[in-house]
Amino acid sequence: MRKLDKSTTFRSIVALALMSWALPASAGDAAAIDAGCVDCHGADGLASENLNAPVIAGMPAAHIEEAIYAYRDGARQCRFEPMMCETVLHTSDERIADLAEYYAALPRDSSRECYDAKLAFRGKEVHERLCSGCHLKPDDDGVEDALGIPLHGQRGAYLRYALESYMDGRREKLLEAMARKLAELEKGDIDALVNYYASY
């Protein structure tokens, strides 16, 4: 009998886990529907156990679906969190819709991360000049119809990674307008934005 090495055993365990996660679940079954996501994003979508994962609670369902499709289809690379691509690789369209609806319905909260007030003040100016047309604050009118995803309460480490990935080409800029705005960012603006979004 052939002896299995550790990497083969690990791959087998991952494959079995993915197969079980891909089984259908009803939209109302919270325990089952987030089983494949809870390790990184948490059952509440606030990623409190993994500060490198994005907060997805309260994010519009359409944006969650778009992100999962991008990871599943290879349009978005998983260099920061490789498990994301492995987890969604065999996820059906129906299940993606269920997951998106589940997490979109959860309440979003502040990240409660420490922030630098001076940088946050600068970040507010950058946000209002470059980002506010699409990424609205929680108290802005029409936030449910915002073109861009909500950024308040997002983890600083993830937000910094995402912005830098858009800047250096690791992530595709979905809109030409976003590409133009990102091109206007100056040195230190990303840190300023991260501190601003942590401040409210």
Image (spheres, helix red, strand yellow):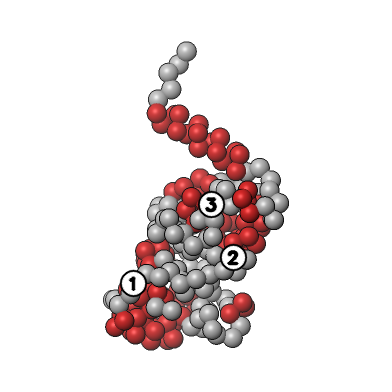
Q: Is residue 75 above or below residue 122?
A: above
- Residue drawn 62% across the image and 66% down it: 105
Please name the amino acid that badge 1 sits on: Cys
Q: Tell me if 47 is positioned left or right of 117 in this view.
A: right
- Give the mark nearer the N terminus: 3 vs 1: 3
The three-letter code of the residue at mark 2 reads Leu
The residue that label 1 is drawn on is: 114
Judged by depth in the image, the label closer to the viewer, 3 or 2, is 2
Mark 1 to mark 2 CA distance (whole Å): 23 Å
User: How crowded is the residue under tag 1: few (<14 C-alpha within 10 Å), some, or many (20+)?
Assistant: few
Provide the secondary structure element on which disc 3 rests.
loop
What amino acid does circle 3 point to? Cys
Q: Nearer the viewer, residue 28 or 164?
A: 28
Q: Residue at x 54, y 84 (%)?
A: 139
**Viewed as shown, does residue 72 lie left or right of 117?**
right
The label shown at residue 37 is 3
Residue topped by disc 2: 106
